[in-house]
Image: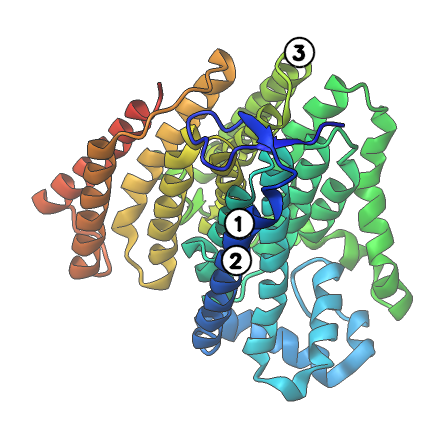
Amino acid sequence: MTNDTIETGALRNPYRRVNADRALPERWHIPIVIMLACGFAGLALRYLAREHTNSDAIQFLIPWYTFARDHGIGALAEPFTNYTPFYSYLLLIAACFDWLGQPLSLVKTISAIFELGCAIVVAQMVWRATRVPLRASMAFCSVWLAPTVLFNGAMWGQADAIWTFFTLLSVAMFMRNRNGVLPFAISCSVKAQGVFLGPFVLGMILRRKIHLAWLAAIPGAYAILAIPVLVAGRSLVSVLGVYLGQASTFHHLTMNAANVWVFAGATPYTVGVAIGLVLAAASGLALSIFIAQSKRTGPEFILLVACASLILMPYLLPKMHERYFYAFELASIALACINLRYLPFAVIAQVDGVLSYLAFESEIVMGLLPAALCNTFLVFYLVLDLRQGERGFRLPKLAWLGFIASTAGLFSYLLFAGAGLNISPAYMLTAGLAALMTLLLIKESRA
């Protein structure tokens, strides 16, 4: 074991090491102050958004919480949510603190706790990969204050931070050369979206020759987590049919997800579903084989292929919601903090996410097209990096300035134009310019 650590200021070579015996305590002062400041800022923003509501909260979240509060442990005998049993347990726990706040505030508290967990896991990823306190601190703050995280949990009270927490934990364990199948299994038991990491996990199982019997942990975790509701009297058919019921809820190829189906919206539903499933399965299998056969090593590579899995699946699959890029958005922050080459990826992912969220929040659907186009760029260049294995980067100031200005212009236009479809020359100009500057930023950031 060496006493070396990584030089904080080595931006262009984050792996250059210096002796840390005399410097480590001092090097933690500023990062800790930054984390505390951002931590309290995040709490303040969540407090301000505690009463913000939408149709999902009124129709689903608040009634679910109320049912759990009014029926207590007996609620477990009923399918009072359309989520897996794990979420029912969390609602029951939250209901024990009913005197602390309004129903929606307590539901949002569940999300906030797991958002904090996600921020801690990402910070741990970065710290173990770089040993740079400032980078770990920035990773924590970036996740805790990420616009899509605030949208998802603080404003909407959604549960995506829960499955993402276990997804990130799985990736973090694989980055440390440990078996991360169990947290992946729990992620899939929380929400079906946990399967987005499936190609990565399969690839790591094959790569490290982990026994295939570990795949039994996926149904096993679901079965174990379902024991309390089964004991309470809920039917086995109801418990096993959760994901089937979710899959049949909507019949649109995209539910505001900025993916490939934005470009193919006219495709017949059944045809699109079949094509999307085949594309996702083929791409996922190809990624798994690549991971298993690749000679590249190190935590950065492991995180890179995990990010590829987390963006490829929601990008190709039909019936995706705008929230389903959540895990990629947070994993890309970790990747950017480890290697600044991927800073544009993390920033662009946030911009695309907010554009998608606005489609549901304010019915500003015109942001989906440029968001889907920019996500296409991310997928292309992420896969390109997998093939080429490049790690260099640049910080192109003019490209960043152009990206910021064009993105601000696009948001200004969309907010001014409001809801509905309005493909005007001004829209084409602002959307096209934003997409062009996004592409330029990605290309110019690559050494």
Q: In which quadrant is the C terminus drawn?
A: top left
115 left or right of 266 in image: right
Discs 2/3, front: 2
Is 339 above or below relative to 35?
above
Position of residue 57 relative to residue 290, above or below, is below
Q: Which residue is mark 1?
A: 137
- Left or right? Give the position of 17 relative to 363: right
Q: CA distance from mark 2 to mark 3?
A: 39 Å
Label 2 sits on a secondary structure element that is helix
Question: Residue 232: image x %, image y %?
Answer: 88, 70
* Callouts 2 and 1 close, C-beta under 8 Å: yes
Q: Is residue 418 left or right of residue 50?
A: left
Label 2 CA crowd tier, 10 Å (few <14, some 14–19, many 20+): many
Report the Cα–Cα distance between label 2 and label 1.
Answer: 6 Å
Taking 408 as reference, is 44 above or below it?
below
User: Disc 2 designates what residue?
Assistant: 35
In which image quadrant can residue 376 be found? top left
Residue located farthest toward the left when viewing the structure as drawn: 425
- Note whether residue 195 is visible: yes
Residue 246, can we see it?
Answer: no
> Which mark is drawn over residue 293?
3
Label 2 vs 3, first from the N-terminus: 2
Q: At 61% across and 43% down in the image, what residue appears? A: 24
Looking at numbered disc 1 in the image, what kind of residue is underneath it? Ser
- In the image, residue 445 sits, relative to residue 145, either above or below, namely above
